[in-house]
Image: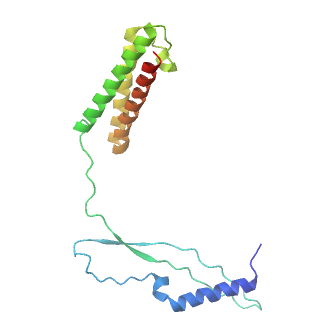
Amino acid sequence: MGTTSGQQILRLMFVGALATLAPAWLAAQQVDSGSNRGASEPVLMASLALPSAPVPHVGGGASPAAVVGVMPVVAVKAPTELPQEHRRFWDNENRLLFLAAGGMATADFFVTRSNLVDGGKELNPVTRIFAGSTPALACNFALEEAGVIAVSYMFHKTGHHKLERMTSFVNISASAGAVAYSASHH
């Protein structure tokens, strides 16, 4: 349903009233007192485009009145220092995470092997391929840990440091869940 010309005129009058009553608000002018900022701190200015009001059609062949959209200006303080990401892949946190992931993989191996010896069944379809022999099962868990380190390294090299750490956390959680399930169903 379209708007009538009466509604368009009311909108135009409302915009005009706002423009006369609050010109500083519409133009988003901000007076900078300078008291909160030192000379060395840069300030970025950002603007946000607002949708323009509909242009009403004036009857009788006259040209339509144009309503200009307003773009407010917002002061944004620039960060003075960027956070330092770790430069080395084998830092203490990664060593600890890989040690914990390896420990959980080892625990998963022993609990899984114990269940298989007692007649249990491997539920993971990928690991089930290696469940026939102890060396093959050990290689599966060792390759799993190597894969975690490789994916973590890929995230490190591409600058995704949170994902780099998250890879180990996900693997530790999955192995802990597998150990808990296997231990409770033994």
Camera-side residue of 76 and 109: 109
Viewer-side residue, 92 vs 61: 92
Check the image and report above or below for 181 versus 40: above
Query: Relative to 77, is 13 above or below?
Result: below
Q: Position of residue 11 (x, y in %)?
A: 65, 84
- In the rendered structure, the answer to whether residue 63 lies left or right of residue 178 reads right
Up the image or down, 172 lies above or below 162; here it is above
Say if residue 79 shows up in the picture: yes
Quadrant of the image containing the N terminus:
bottom right
In the visual, does 31 lie left or right of 55? left
Q: Nearer the viewer, residue 181 or 2?
A: 181
Is any atom of residue 139 visible in this view?
no
Quadrant, the C terminus: top left
Count of numbered circles on the image: 0
Please tell me in which quadrant of the rendered image residue 95 appears. top left
Instruction: Where is residue 156? Give x, y as percent.
Output: 32, 40
Residue 175 falls in image quadrant: top left
Colour scheme of the picture: rainbow
**Residue, x 29% and y 83% (percent of image)?**
33
